[in-house]
Image (cartoon, rainbow, N blue to C red):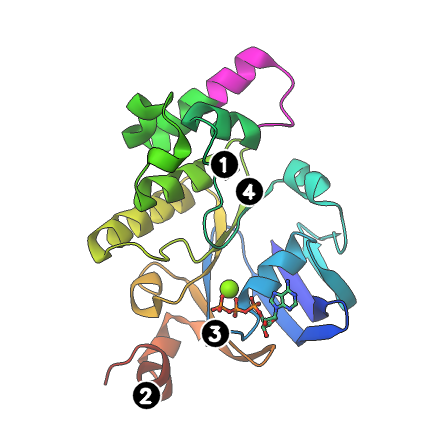
């Protein structure tokens, strides 16, 4: 589904990733964990072509998509939810969702997508369609940000720290939603600080350190003492 090979990227002169390799199969949930500044967000931004890629390649459904413009990636079926939510506060919930469907020119179909996203994924936003996004709670804003990315029916969804700043109960609910979206056939790559919760729904885990994948594996990786100790704060 997605394959990243020897990726080197960064911000102008500032190289952040030094040869990242990732392999994600259809329908998996892959979680990227690692310390602050390790380059987790930079991996997602590289896929979505928001930064400078110096070397390496990214394949999506066997197609080389390295440095494809973001709107082309959206058309191919990649959705991106940036770190810190970034919904448009001064737009309504409906307007935010419609922004997510900006490539859809057919008005009835756009309305149908809004309806679908609300009905199947985020019914709690249904009676808030006319509310400004800034008036929503943190959890609702995150749902809206994900809902916006779902408007184009992505096959692959990139989520950067969806649980950031959310209370534990809200966070659990959000991870449940993410799992539901995955169950409908959407492959997910998620960056998470909350490793313990996130890895409960993960099929695969990548640990990033200093711009490289230091460790990767399936759920059993989490049982390793080193991972438990460093990333899950437990024993
Ligand atoms: N816009 C930018 N311009 C220059 N350097 C940046 C920019 N964004 C991030 N960096 C640098 O790139 C490195 C990796 O950042 P990145 O955001 O990928 O880390 P991260 O693993 O997502 O960390 P966090 O857990 O804090 O979100 C850091 O040293 C950071 O300072
Ligand atoms: Mg980050």
Q: Which residue is mark 4?
A: 155
Residue at mark 4 to residue at mark 2: CA–CA distance: 34 Å
In this rendering, position of residue 176 left or right of residue 207: left
> What segment carries the magenta color?
101-113
Give the quadrant of the C terminus: bottom left
Give neighbour class at mark 4: few <14, some 14-19, many 20+ (Cα, 10 Å): many
The label shown at residue 225 is 2
Between circles 3 and 2, the one closer to the viewer is 3
Mark 3 Cβ inside 8 Å of ligand 1 = yes
- C-beta proximity under 8 Å, tags 2 and 1: no
Residue at mark 2 to residue at mark 1: CA–CA distance: 42 Å
Give whichever of discs 3 and 2 has the lower sequence position.
3
Q: Nearer the viewer, residue 88 or 30?
A: 88
Badge 4 element: loop
Between circles 4 and 1, the one closer to the viewer is 1
Between circles 2 and 1, the one closer to the viewer is 1
- C-beta proximity under 8 Å, tags 1 and 3: no
Q: Quadrant of ligand 1?
A: bottom right
- Quadrant of the image occupied by residue 110: top right
């Amino acid at each position: 589904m997605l394959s990243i090979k020897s990726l080197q990227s960064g911000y102008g002169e500032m190289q952040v990733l030094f040869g990242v390799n990732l392999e994600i199969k259809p329908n998996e949930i892959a979680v990227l964990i690692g310390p602050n500044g390790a380059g987790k967000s930079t991996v997602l931004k590289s896929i979505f072509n928001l930064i400078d890629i110096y070397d390496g390649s990214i394949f999506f459904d066997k197609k080389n998509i390295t440095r494809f413009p973001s709107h082309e990636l959206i058309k191919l079926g990649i959705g991106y939810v940036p770190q810190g939510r970034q919904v448009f506060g001064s737009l309504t919930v409906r307007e935010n969702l419609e922004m997510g469907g900006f490539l859809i020119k057919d008005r009835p179909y756009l309305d149908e997508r809004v309806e679908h996203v609300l009905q199947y994924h985020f019914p709690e936003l249904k009676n808030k369609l006319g509310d400004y996004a800034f008036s929503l709670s943190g959890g609702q804003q995150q749902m809206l940000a994900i809902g916006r990315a779902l408007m184009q029916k992505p096959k692959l969804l990139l989520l950067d720290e969806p649980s950031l700043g959310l209370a534990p109960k809200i966070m659990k609910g959000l991870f449940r939603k993410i799992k539901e979206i995955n169950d409908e056939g959407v492959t997910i790559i998620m960056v998470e600080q909350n490793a313990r919760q996130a890895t409960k729904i993960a099929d695969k885990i990548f640990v990033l350190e200093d711009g490289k994948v230091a460790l990767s594996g399936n759920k059993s990786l989490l049982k390793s003492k080193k991972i438990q100790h460093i990333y899950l704060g437990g024993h």
